[in-house]
Amino acid sequence: MRSTEAPRIAVLGSLNMDLVVRVPHAPAAGETLQGHSIHSIPGGKGGNQAVSCARQGAQVSLLGCVGADAHGEALRQALQQDGIDTTAVQIDPAAPTGTALVMVEDSGQNRIVVIAGANARVEIDDAALAARLDRAAFLVAQFESPLVQVARAMNAAVRAGCKVLLNPSPVQAVDAALWPLIDTLVVNEVEARTLAGQPAEEPRDAAAAGAVLRARGVARVVVTLGAGGAVAIDADGARHHPAPRVQAVDTTAAGDTFLGALAVTLACGGSLDEAVRLGIRAAALCITQPGAQPSIPLRDAVLRSPLPPDWTPL
Ligand code: RIB
């Protein structure tokens, strides 16, 4: 990284209390099975990405919405413990805090159902947004917030000279007018396939799908491939970054952890390849621990972790 000053990052996104059930395997239709455990753990893509940015050393502010309930209070407190500015997190008494039902198999793979609750009621306050975009290197957003609010924030960010890092997850169609506003697009293989309309599971396919998305006006695209690493696509071409082999305990928030490390590296002037490599190291640590936010590593731990194998041009 080039700069030593903590970069500012504004995150617009969801806050969920994850109800995490550990099971030997996901039950088939009609099957009843004994689970191992159930826990309530802070999550939500917006909250997780904010935590990842903060644990990588950024000054983070979060725009979102929770209900006036115990889950909302617990989520806000957890974020504050990471030094995240939550003064733009709205409290809506008319809706419950967002909830995610997370089923984690012994293999570490998960299945998630999200009930948006208060996340669906977030309303951008223009003055609050402008204050958080001031001197911010990035606006980070996902699609667990209403698309009209995401679009509004993206337009405001570009007007303020702040770059947009979009993670369109859960995947939905992206309005044609939004593509040129995106500096960095981070998608997994499923999202890349859906948005580009072509396969993206293998590195060469991911590079081709990423090129299709770049042609819509995005400066840089990263396609994450889980255990297969990630593919970085920019004006210099496409590179495949392999991931280290790791015994997965729980893959929840691996993508969010990756994104935070990527965002902070880019915000500090690092190259896309440096950012992807740090993101891969952070995600590799994340999946060795259970839960969403508790599993997101601190910067020191990421820097002490083994270097991933070298990237190869595609
Ligand atoms: O990306 C992982 C997150 O997705 C979980 O924490 C869950 O809340 C859902 O939003």
Image: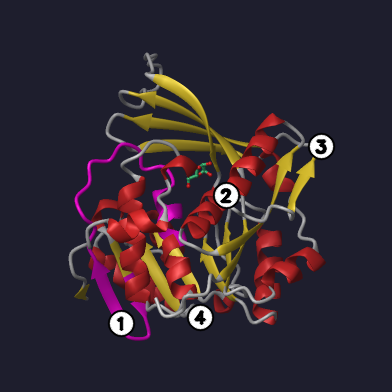
Check disc 4 and give the amino acid type.
Answer: Gly
Check disc 3 and give the amino acid type.
Answer: Pro
Magenta stretch holds residue 52: no
Q: Are marks 3 and 1 in contact (CB under 8 Å)?
A: no
Q: Nearer the viewer, mark 2 or mark 3?
A: 2
Check disc 1 and give the amino acid type.
Answer: Gly
Q: CA distance from mark 2 to mark 3?
A: 20 Å
Badge number at residue 237: 1
Cβ at disc 1 under 8 Å from ligand 1:
no
In this figure, which residue is indicated by the disc labeled 2?
A: 47
In this figure, which residue is indicated by the disc labeled 3?
A: 93
Q: Dot 3, crowdedness within 10 Å: few (<14), some or many (≥20)?
A: few
Q: Are marks 4 and 3 in contact (CB under 8 Å)?
A: no
Residue 189 visible to the viewer = no
User: What element does badge 2 sit on?
Assistant: helix
Q: Nearer the viewer, mark 4 or mark 2?
A: 2
User: What element does badge 3 sit on?
Assistant: loop
Query: If you read the primary sequence from the N terminus, does the residue marked by circle 4 or circle 1 appear first?
Result: 4
Check disc 2 and give the amino acid type.
Answer: Gly
